[in-house]
Image (tube, rainbow, N blue to C red):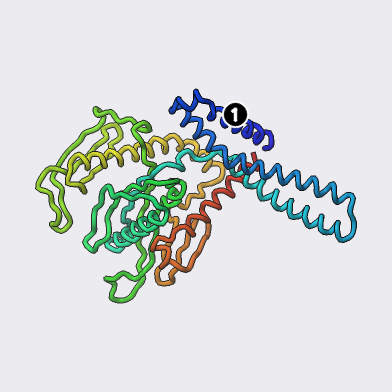
Amino acid sequence: MLDKLILLEDKYYELSQQLSDPEVITDQALFQKLAKAHAALVEIVETYQQYKSLDEDLQTAREMLAEESGAAAKLLNDEIELYREQQELLSKRLKLLLIPKNPNDEKNVIIEIRAGTGGDEAALFAGNLFRMYTRYAEFRNWRLEILSMNESDLGGFKEIVFSISGVQVYSRMKYECGVHRVQRVPETEAGGRIHTSAATVAVLIEAEEVDVAINTNDIRVDVFRAGGHGGQCVNTTDSAVRITHLATGLVVTCQDEKSQLKNKEKAMKVLRARLLEKFQSEQHQEMAQTRRDMVGSGDRSERIRTYNFPQNRLTDHRINLTLYHLDQIIEGKLEEVIEPLVNFAQAEALQNADQQ
C-alpha cells in the first residue's frame, strides 16, 4: 500500500507543476483534464501526508520514551497509544481511498417506480415513495424532473418515471433499486385489517449520447393524442410520443408535455438510460452468475425494504437495519437509511481488499 501511495503522491506533485505551466493553462481542454486528475488525488495525498506526519510524531515519542521514566514515561506511553489509534484510523481511510471508485457514482439517474401487488394501495404507496425521494432530493440540493407518469384513480401512481441530477446522485440512489414492501391499513379498509402491498423501484444511470449512440434507423417514433386521467388535461394535438427501439423491443412513452419535441427529448433520455442498463447488465451477467455459483445467490432484491406503518417501523433486509421513525423517513429523511448501506458496502470493500 505504501509503495502505491508514494507513486500517487509523486503523480500529484507532477500534476501540480503541469497545471502551473503557461502552455498547459492556455490549452483549456488539457488544463481541465489535468485539473480533474489532480482533484481526484487531493484527498488521498492529504490523508497520506497526515499519516506520514503522525508516523514521525510516533517515532519521536518512542525515542523520547527510551530516555524517560516515571510520570514522564507514562505520559509518553499514553501519547504513543493515541498516535497508534489515529494511525490505524488513517490507515483504514487510505485503504478505502485506494479502492477503485465506481465510475458511475458521479452520474445522474432516472428512477422508475411501479405499483406492484396490492392494486390501488400499491399505487398509493408508489406515490409515497415518489414524495419521499422528492423530499430527499431537496435535502441533497438535487434537481428532480418528472419524465412520465400514469396516475391511479385514488391519486397514487401506477407508474412514474423521473430524473434526478446533482452531485453524486447514483452513489446514494443505487441502494434504492428493488422491491419495497408496505404494511398498513388502507383508507378503503373498513375492518381495520393490515394489508401488504409492494412497489418496485428501478434506478438507471442517465446515459449521455456519448454513452449510448442511437441510430435513427434503429428506432420507430409514433405520435398520438395524449389522454389525461379522468378526462382531464387531454390534448387536442398529437403531442404524445412513443419510441420503439427495434433491435431490443424496448418501448418508451411520454405524454406529459404539451410539446411533441419535449416529449420526444424526454422519451429519448429514458430510452438511453434503459439501453445502457441493458448493455451493462448483459456484460456483468456472466460474472454475476459465476459469483452466485461460488457463494450462493444471497440475492434479497425481491424485498429490499419493509415499511410497517402501524409500528412506525422501517426494516432494510439487506443489512438487518431496523428504525422506529418511519413517519420521518417517509417524509424524506432517508440519509439515516442510506448511510448505513454505504458504510456496509465500504466495509465489504475493505474486507475484499485485505483478502487480495
User: Pointer 1: residues within 10 angstroms few (<14), some, or many (20+)?
Assistant: few
Can residue 198 be seen here? The reply is: no
Q: Nearer the viewer, residue 172 or 78?
A: 78
For numbered disc 1, what is the local secondary structure? helix
On-image quarter of the C terminus: top right
Which residue is painted at 77% across and 55% down in the image? 79
Which residue is painted at 40% across and 60% down in the image? 332
Which residue is painted at 45% across and 25% down in the image? 27
On-image quarter of the N terminus: top right
Image coordinates of residue 147 in percent, x first then y, are 27, 47
- The quadrant in which residue 130 appears is bottom left
Image coordinates of residue 101 in percent, x first then y, are 52, 40
Image coordinates of residue 324 in percent, x first then y, are 48, 68
| Rendered position, 328 above or below 265 | below
- The quadrant in which residue 158 appears is bottom left
Q: Amino acid at mark 1?
A: Glu
| Rendered position, 77 above or below 105 | below
Q: Nearer the viewer, residue 21 or 211?
A: 21
Residue at mark 1: 14
